[in-house]
Image: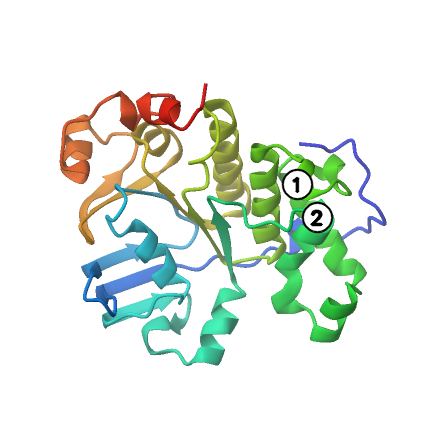
Amino acid sequence: MSTQVRRPGAAAGVGAEDASTPWGIALEGVTVRYPNGTVGLNNVSLDIPPGSMVAIVGLSGSGKSTLIRTINGLVPVSSGVLRVGGATVSAARPGALRALRGEIGMVFQGFNLAGRASVLQNVLVGRLAHTPLWRTLLGAYRPADREIAYEALDSVGILHKLYARASDLSGGQQQRVAIARALAQQPKIVLADEPVASLDPPTAHGVMRDLRRINTERDLTVLVNLHLLDLAREYGVRMIGMRAGEVVYDGPAATATDRDFERIYGRAIGAADSLGGDASRERGVQ
């Protein structure tokens, strides 16, 4: 953590103290059917208490990305009931869904940063839902918003990159900027969709440690989509295994066995299912 770097214009009382109370998530018989007939989720029921650290595991097409996108209202529920915090997402109107997304921090595999913009400018994007439009258009963010951005960057150890262009950062640093952007929302939930899939093993572990620390220090609900069993075991407290849109495992992550993973993956477990295994080498990771 870059605590030796002084936050520009730092003022007491702004930042982590303003963290929001986390939300829980409940799905009751939720089914998602896409317009082409593909079933993304099939009668899924889950109860995720506030402050949980959950690893969602499954192969591509298992439904784990659909689950994340359904929780933040990007994919509509076909049947069943989905509650996020105090809101019934499955019955929410468009305005309510936009407000909901302002309370949910998203972290993506591809970072989704503006490469030519500074790290600070990218993180301030997390304040859009809490900032009047005219301030956003003029870049006239309030001092309190900047303080929140500084604190978010400090929490993931890259405050010293405040004015660097995002495109000049390494992949791991860019993902930390993306996490800081999510934290700048002061979210009730953080959803991370394959956040380490494009990173080398040491960097992947560093990003996962950041997410786990955010969960424990802020008591923040964190859901992370993964496909590597060793990361799920090490950093998840609870693990949800998905296959063909259904939950096939729901229990402690640390004690999940290879047999459990074989049920999730539908095949025998091999080196490609661990970080640094064949799958990583195929992506060019050394």
Q: Quadrant of the C terminus?
A: top left
Image x and y of residue 234, in percent: 37, 29
Do callouts 1 and 2 mark residues in contact (Cβ within 8 Å)? yes
Q: Quadrant of the N terminus?
A: top right
Mark number for residue 116?
Answer: 2
Q: Secondary structure at mark 2?
A: loop
Q: Secondary structure at mark 1?
A: helix
> Going from the N terminus, do you reach mark 1 or mark 2 first?
2
Report the side of 215 relative to 56 (left or right): right
Callout 1 amino acid: Ser
- Residue 252 location, quadrant: top left
Report the side of 213 relative to 35 (left or right): right
| Residue bearing mark 1 | 167
Image x and y of residue 284, in percent: 43, 24
The correct choice, above or below, for 129 with respect to 61 in the image is below
- Residue shown at 47% from the left, 48% from the top: 108
Image x and y of residue 208, in percent: 47, 34
